[in-house]
Image (cartoon, helix red, strand yellow):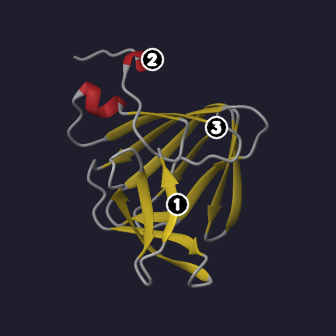
């Protein structure tokens, strides 16, 4: 048995104001667990994405998330849960005026190949992306695979 206090965990760089590695702290081997706090407009993800081999579940503790999906936008409110099967494209966004708190679960921990799409201003469309660490190590970057342009910076 393992027990942790979420507030005691380090914050990871990413698109959310707060992203804490609960599963890593608990030592889970087959399931990723992350706690998020999002300001209005922030996301749990670097872009519209799908994990080839990972199921994902998001439980909204407080606030409202809007998920962009292939079937249109879906709002998930406080006390609600949403499930995505492997390969299903989605991206969350805090759709409310206040902070949202969310618990994200993914199994298996390694989701296999990641499809990550973001708008690339230089290409003029949504393109495949890679995530890289900035040269100074202070941020994570999303970079267009097609043209090499930076499309996002997350600290």
Q: Nearer the viewer, mark 2 or mark 1?
A: 1
Q: Which mark is residue 7?
A: 2
Q: Is residue 61 left or right of residue 73?
A: left
Q: Nearer the viewer, residue 36 or 138?
A: 138
Which of the two labelled residues, at mark 1 and mark 3, occupies the earlier sequence position?
3
Q: Residue at x 21, y 29 (%)?
A: 27
Q: Nearer the viewer, residue 121 or 72?
A: 121
Q: Residue at x 52, y 51 (%)?
A: 83
Task: Give above or below for 38 relative to 126.
Answer: above
Tag 1–tag 3 contact (CB < 8 Å): no
**What crowding class fits label 2: few (fewer than 14 Cα within 10 Å), some (14-19), or many (20 or more)?**
few
Pinpoint residue 61: horizontal percent, then vertical percent. 61, 29
State the SS at label 3: loop
Q: CA distance from mark 1 to mark 3?
A: 29 Å
Q: CA distance from mark 2 to mark 3?
A: 22 Å
Pinpoint residue 22: horizontal percent, then vertical percent. 36, 29
Q: Is residue 139 left or right of residue 102?
A: left
Classify residue 11 by image quadrant. top left
Classify residue 99 by image quadrant. top right
**What crowding class fits label 3: few (fewer than 14 Cα within 10 Å), some (14-19), or many (20 or more)?**
some
Q: Residue at x 57, y 58 (%)?
A: 91
Q: Which mark is residue 152?
A: 1
Q: Nearer the viewer, residue 141 or 115?
A: 141
């Amino acid at each position: 048995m393992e027990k942790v206090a979420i507030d005691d965990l380090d914050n990871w760089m990413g698109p959310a104001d707060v992203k804490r590695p609960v599963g890593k702290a608990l030592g889970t081997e087959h399931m990723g667990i992350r706690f998020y706090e999002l300001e209005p407009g922030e996301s749990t993800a670097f872009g519209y994405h799908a994990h080839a081999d990972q199921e994902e579940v998001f439980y909204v503790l407080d606030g409202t998330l809007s998920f962009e999906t292939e079937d249109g936008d879906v709002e998930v409110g406080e006390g609600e849960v949403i499930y995505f099967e492997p390969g299903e494209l989605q991206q969350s966004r805090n759709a409310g005026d206040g902070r949202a708190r969310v618990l994200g679960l993914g199994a298996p921990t390694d989701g296999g190949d990641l499809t990550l799409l973001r708008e690339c201003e230089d290409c003029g469309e949504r393109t495949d992306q890679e995530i890289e660490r900035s040269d100074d190590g202070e941020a994570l970057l999303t970079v267009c695979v097609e043209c090499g342009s930076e499309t996002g910076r997350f600290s």
